Image (cartoon, rainbow, N blue to C red):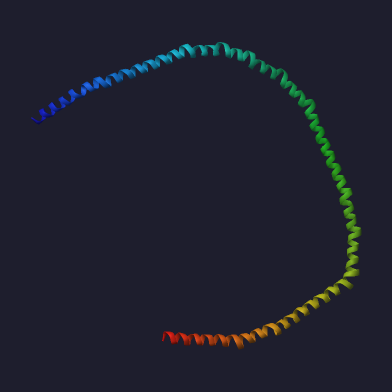
Amino acid sequence: MEQQQQQGGGGCLVAVVRPVVVAVVVPLRLLWELLVLVARGIGWVCDKVLLWPLRLLWRYVLRPLLRWLVVIPLCGLWRWVVRPMLEWLWRYVLAPIGRGVRAVAAGLGKVVAWLARYLVAVPARTVWRWVLVPLGKAFHHGLWRPVLFPVLRALWVAFVWAWRLGGRIWRFTVMRPCRWVRREVWWPVKAEIRRVAREVRRTLLG
């Protein structure tokens, strides 16, 4: 009985939905298929009317013209004109110039080395050996030992003595009075302040 009622209810629902599907979905589906067919037709027309002639034009006209009028002449120009000219330029102009520049640089390097040796190193070594070293020895034996060394030693002794004297004066004039003030004045005053503070705290707090 219940099954028959469910079947009856389902039949009513199908009877209501079927006209809606037929009236809405089927026209939309037909319209979509029509649009697809139109798009395919437009694509086919564009391919056959526009693109196919362009492909033929490129394949049979433009590409051969580009090859025979541009690529092959440029390759021939490079092979028979430009490359031989560059090779000749390198062999007979640039390479000799490079070798000449290298030879000049090597010669200049040798000249600079010779000048540096005989105008700087040799005179400097000669001056060092025959002027500065004897002057240094003469200064060391004739002026350092008898004059400068005793003067510097006397100055050092005077500095040490003055340092020690200054330390003693500092100790007697500053350190001892400060220690006396700390021991005889500051510590008693500090102890009295602590005692008064304890008395006040005891009086206030009990």
> Does 29 appear above or below 112?
above
Which residue is nearer to you in this view: 1 or 9?
Answer: 9
Q: Residue furthest left?
A: 1
Instruction: Say which quarter of the image contains residue 87.
Output: top right
Position of residue 119 measured from the top left corner of the image (x, y, whole percent): 89, 49
Instruction: Depth check: give the residue in front, 43 or 191.
Output: 191
Is the C terminus in the top left, top right, bottom left or bottom right quadrant?
bottom left
Residue drawn at x 61%, y 85% as measured from the top left: 182
Q: Is residue 51 above or below residue 140?
A: above
* Residue 22 horizontal side relative to residue 73, left or right: left
Which residue corresponds to the image point at 89% horizontal and 60% vertical from the top-left?
132
Residue 146 horizontal side relative to residue 40, left or right? right
Q: Is residue 109 left or right of residue 24?
A: right
Tally of numbered tags: 0
User: Residue 138 lies in what quarter of the image?
Assistant: bottom right
For the residue pair 126 and 57, the one nearer the viewer reads as 57
Relative to residue 125, is residue 71 depicted above or below? above
Q: Is residue 206 above or below residue 130?
A: below
Q: Nearer the viewer, residue 184 or 102?
A: 184
Q: Position of residue 181 (x, y in %)?
A: 63, 86
Q: Which quarter of the rendered picture does the N terminus lie within?
A: top left
State the residue at coordinates (45%, 14%).
46
Q: Position of residue 115 (x, y in %)?
A: 87, 46
Residue 146, percent from left and from top: 89, 73
> Please, which residue is most extreme toward the front here?
204
Query: In the displayed structure, does residue 72 sit left or right of residue 124?
Result: left
> Which residue is pictured at 86% across the width and 42% down the height?
111
